[in-house]
Image: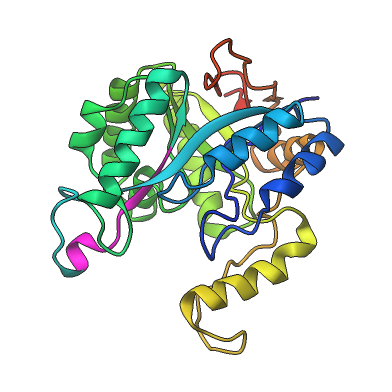
Amino acid sequence: MSFTHLHLHTEYSLLDGAIRIKELPGRLKEMGMDACAITDHGAMYGILDFYRTMKANGIHPIIGCEVYVAPRSHKEKEGAADRDPSHLILLAENNEGYHNLIRLVSAGFVDGFYYRPRIDKELLEKHHGGLIALSACLSGEVPRLILDGQRERAVEIALEHRDLFGADNYFLEIQANGLSEQAIVNQELIKISRETGIPLVATNDCHYLNKDDAFAHDVLLCMQTGKTLNTPDRMKMETDTLYVRSPEEMAACNAARFWKMKLAMTTAAKASASVRSSPRAASQTDR
């Protein structure tokens, strides 16, 4: 059985990701994986280190980023209205996508920085070529709309993304992390997939390497937010599943949670170009 992690945060997701790049290849090879993506929050600081380390260990590197998409223009910066961007996973399919990803992330820092580096939909219109998109975690636009009771609008946005990136380049992202809100989102994403034909992809939103690293990650979040472990109502991940799971674990948890649907989990397609990568064959879930 093969599986490729397409949503993974390294130490370069500062004070959030706890996966040291130098330790990642050993874990991946131990589990029989030969490809992996990097999708740090809003930044591409880690891609050179990631690329070189994966290549040196015979693992296919997939270059990506979990970008922040502003609710309005990325240049508007007015209080609460612009403080909470949605998330979107972007993966470079080829050299064009790699350079477009660089343009987007750079624009997010140069013109769109407001609490976080943000892009907007106008920028995505200009620089979407060669990119593959996943609907992201609970902070993605589609999941947020589902949780807000705006299912029709969620479908509209999903279709907009499909039309922008292409029918083969946009995926609805489901996760088996044990969160009650995620279970609600998963059920609706499965229904939307059946209604629209937009394919599903299974990810694990990896933030730490092993399951027993969950506590260390919790401490890291306290450092990020200036809190202590004893602070009431502090930011906390209410799950200990955001680690680099094995293909067998991914198959078991997804089969159990998603009506025993069989996962078509094959390795990410190998490409001839040095930065070419594709998740079309990776982690895709049969509807």
Q: Which quadrant of the rendered structure holds the C terminus?
A: top right
Q: Is residue 153 above or below residue 78?
A: above
Q: Which quadrant of the rendered structure holds the N terminus?
A: top right
Residue furthest top in the image: 272
Q: At 33% from the left edge and 28% from the top edge, which residue is drawn?
A: 100
Judging depth in this view, the residue of 178 and 165 nearest the camera is 165
Question: Would you say residue 179 sits in the magenta stretch?
Answer: no
Q: At 21% from the left edge and 27% from the top edge, which residue is drawn?
A: 126
How far across and how far down the image is residue 54, in percent?
69, 33
How far across and how far down the image is residue 42, in percent?
40, 49
Q: Along the horizontal axis of the image, is 63 left or right of 270?
A: left
Q: Is residue 163 above or below residue 237?
A: above
The span picked out in magenta is: 80-89
Q: Along the horizontal axis of the image, is 123 left or right of 251?
A: left
How far across and how far down the image is residue 167, in percent?
39, 17
Residue furthest right in the image: 30
Q: At 30% from the left edge and 64% from the top edge, which residue is drawn?
A: 115
Q: Is residue 43 above or below residue 161?
A: below
Q: Along the horizontal axis of the image, is 153 left or right of 94?
A: left
Q: At 65% from the left edge and 54% from the top edge, which residue is drawn?
A: 242
Where residue 278 sits, quadrant-wise, is: top right
